[in-house]
Image (cartoon, rainbow, N blue to C red):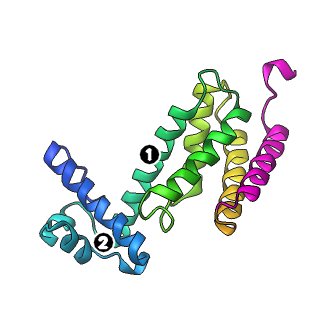
Amino acid sequence: MRRTPVQQRSVERVGQMLDAAAELLAEGGYDALSTRAVAARTGLPIGSIYRFFDDKRGLAQALARRNLEQFLAGIAVGMPGAAHWDQVVDVVVDEYLRMKRTVPGFAVIDFGDNHEVAAALAEMLAARAGLTDGEPLRMALLTAVEAADALLRAHHGDPAMVEETKEMLRAYLARRLPPAVGDR
């Protein structure tokens, strides 16, 4: 973003812009997204769009950031209180699929960079599941995120493939992350 909104009115306008960008993506894909189309959709002058975003790429990046924040919030709500990492696999995959079905434009622009997703998940697991954040955890989670992303995109949420993906993630991560306290 060119500038971070501070006043409530600006925050709401940026939200409108991102909502419009998401709708345009859902309707016509990345080619349908433009600053001019967002201005037309919101009824805002194009200068208002450029006040916060350089171009359509900036809009897409901000939307990806918002999607990641929403994803992490959904995971936090779905996590059991004293979650072990293997219990979180279902929560993460299910939240991803929920967003894919319900969040406009998410199928076109989800989070952007899987490195950011892995880093955010590492921080969350370190805080909530007692894991140590660091390069080994982030690499394991990046590998898991990349694999899950590829499988879930390729098979469009097929229930059998969703279950296979969850099982694969648990098996892979079991070799990389510490066992549950009762499993030691």
Q: CA distance from mark 1 to mark 2?
A: 23 Å
The reply to whether the magenta stretch includes residue 166 is yes
- Return the x and y of residue 119 as percentages of the image width and height: 58, 44
Q: Which disc number belongs to residue 70?
A: 1
* Residue at position x 15%, y 64% in the image: 48
From the top left corner, tell me how far across and down residue 112 is, in percent.
Answer: 51, 61
Describe the element under mark 1 as helix, strand or loop.
helix
**Image quadrant of residue 152?**
bottom right
Q: Quadrant of the C terminus?
A: top right
Q: Is residue 58 visible?
A: no
Residue at point 71%, 50% (across, down): 144
Q: Is residue 68 left or right of residue 15?
A: right
Q: Which residues are magenta?
A: 157-184
The numbered disc on residue 157 is none
Neighbour tally class for label 1: few under 14, some 14-19, many 20 plus, Cα within 10 Å: some
- SS class of the residue under badge 2? loop
**Residue appearing at x 83%, y 18% in the figure:** 182
Mark 2 and mark 1 in contact (Cβ < 8 Å)?
no
Check the image and name the residue furthest to the front: 159
Q: 127 or 74: nearer the eye?
A: 74
Q: Earlier in the sequence, mark 1 or mark 2?
A: 2
Nearest to the eye among marks 1 and 2: give it.
1
Q: Amino acid at mark 2?
A: Asp
Q: Residues within 10 Å of mark 2 (few under 14, many from 20)?
A: some
Which disc is residue 55 wearing? 2
